[in-house]
Image (cartoon, grey):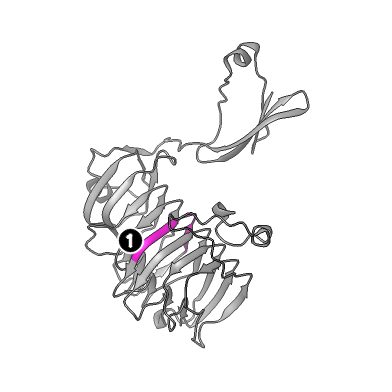
Amino acid sequence: TITLSPGNITRTVTAAEIAAGEAIVTGLTGETLYTAKLLNGTKVRGTITFTTLLDLGGAIAVYPTDNLATLIANANAGDVFALFPGTYTINADITVAKSISLKGARPTDKPKIVGAAFKIRGAAGLSLKDLVLDGTGSIAAQTIVYDEALPTSTYGALSVKDSEIKNYTKGILYINVIALVESMTYSGNVIHDLSCTGAGFVDFRTGLAKTFLFENNTVYNITEDGSRDLFRMDAATTFASTTSVITIRTNTFYNAMNRAAGRYLYVRIPINQITFTKNIIAESLNYYTNQAATTLTSVSGNNYYFAAPATGNFTISENTLKTNGVGDPRWR
């Protein structure tokens, strides 16, 4: 018998399937983490976890031979683009004016988008998942830029998950217009080999997010030009009555800016609540903050622990860190 969870699925294995050494289980949900157990009576003979592939459903299949920039330009609100493995060379800014999603069709073989900067306009939202975003050749030099001032509207949610981001020269997120964003989530990403020249890693000048969540990411080899901060969120006076809830937890930071006068947090949003917990910080001289307006609601469980070989393997062996769930979960 095979059992799967979630869903409490039970599948009786036939004699023919036992002889063949394989069985097909149908009815699973796409993009879901399952645990499967093989049982002989009540005894567990084997356990495996796996994540199902994207169920295309109504998604639009995209291949490297397609013009991704044109597809996005002609998108309808709510479109989901499923990118199949390969390289999509853009080397241009892409305007996102309607809420869309871009997802890798096969998470184990992520599609590579080269030279793209996503410029968000028109109160749009954007979801990116299971992609490799390579900034080589990018014009704007930042991964995501909010490009239109909307003082009376709210941008849709931004979500960047389970992706690799590298080789941008001005950071991963920039808002220098009056823009209020419903929510921002960065989760499960590996972000590395970026230079922050002329802007911070995450840089809000005149906008803010109602909620900003940065969790379970690995960030390494981030350089700057001598005056940049990792998370800069400046005083957005247009939204002076809006609370911004900022959560940065269970990340691994290695050589992510390394300057004695540098800051991880430079937050001057008029009303903010910041939680910075269970992060590993290694090879950095930066301090948390020196701003009175940066109200750290909770700072705990952060460890300065070197566990990173030059190859980008940040596996930790310290049991205390593992037990307390510190750092990006992939390395425990």
**Residue density around tag 1, few if under 14, some if 14–19, many if 20 or more, within 10 Å:** many
Pick the residue in front: 141 or 271.
Answer: 141
**Is residue 191 part of the magenta span, yes or no?**
yes
What number of labels is visible? Answer: 1
Is 203 positioned to the left or the right of 246 in the image? left
Is 314 positioned to the left or the right of 207 in the image? right
Residue 296, horizontal then vertical, whole percent: 57, 79
Within the image, what quadrant is residue 140 found in? bottom left
The residue singled out by tag 1 in the image is 143
On-image quarter of the N terminus:
top right
Residue at left 39%, top 80%? Answer: 238
Which segment is the magenta one? 183-194
On-image quarter of the C terminus:
bottom right
Residue 213, horizontal then vertical, whole percent: 51, 64
Depicted 139 relative to depicted 71: above or below: below
Residue 281, horizontal then vertical, whole percent: 52, 69
Q: Secondary structure at mark 1?
A: loop
Pick the residue in front: 324 or 234.
Answer: 324
Residue at left 57%, top 14%? Answer: 20
Residue 327, horizontal then vertical, whole percent: 57, 61
Residue at left 36%, top 70%? Answer: 223
Depicted 11 relative to depicted 36: above or below: above
Within the image, what quadrant is residue 247 found in? bottom right
Amino acid type, label 1: Thr
User: Is the stretch drawn in magenta largely helix, strand or loop?
Assistant: strand
Pick the residue in front: 178 or 322.
Answer: 322
**Is residue 211 part of the magenta span, yes or no?**
no
Q: Residue furthest bottom?
A: 292
Q: Residue furthest right?
A: 42
Within the image, what quadrant is residue 110 found in? top left
